[in-house]
Amino acid sequence: MSAATTIKIDPQLKDDLDRLKLFPRETYNDVVSRLVDMAYDSEPISDDTIRRIEESLEDFKRGKYYTQEEVEAELGLR
């Protein structure tokens, strides 16, 4: 038998948890467990990806980018 713990939550939070249930009889334990799983990234961003994002942000700040319209025109989609 597993141990149980009682926690105090606001009524609004309980309502939010109710709306997150996948089916009416799903337990709050299952809902909270699913939310905790979603909070952790199983594939963290690599150092290389972070570096490339930073380079892209610098390009954007310098005005070195294309608008969606420009890309569509270049690809002949407009």
Image (cartoon, grey):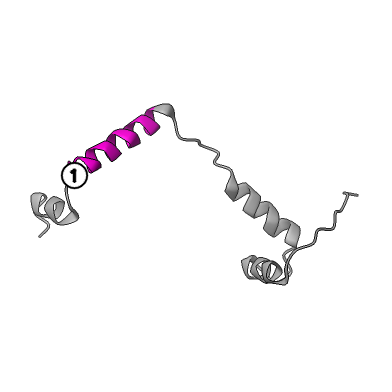
At label 1, the amino acid type is: Tyr
Identify the image quadrant of residue 24: bottom right
Residue drawn at x 58%, y 43% as measured from the top left: 40
Identify the image quadrant of residue 14: bottom right
State the quadrant of the C terminus: bottom left
Label tally: 1
Please, which residue is most extreme toward the top here? 47
Q: Mainly helix, strand or loop, the magenta region?
A: helix
Q: Position of residue 45 (x, y in %)?
A: 45, 35
Looking at the image, residue 46 lies above or below residue 31: above
Q: Nearer the viewer, residue 57 or 26?
A: 57
| Residue receiving disc 1 | 65
On the rendered structure, is 42 left or right of 1?
Answer: left
Which residues are the magenta region?
Answer: 48-64
Q: Position of residue 9 (x, y in %)?
A: 75, 63
Q: Nearer the viewer, residue 75 or 66?
A: 66
On the rendered structure, is 40 left or right of 47?
Answer: right
Identify the image quadrant of residue 16: bottom right
The local crowd at label 1, few if under 14, some if 14 to 19, many if 20 or more residues have their Cα within 10 Å, is: few
What secondary structure is found at the residue carrying circle 1?
Answer: loop
In the image, is residue 23 part of the stretch drawn in magenta?
Answer: no
On the rendered structure, is 76 left or right of 56?
Answer: left
Q: Position of residue 5 (x, y in %)?
A: 85, 54
Residue drawn at x 88%, y 49% as measured from the top left: 3
Q: Position of residue 77 (x, y in %)?
A: 12, 57
Residue drawn at x 9%, y 49% as measured from the top left: 74
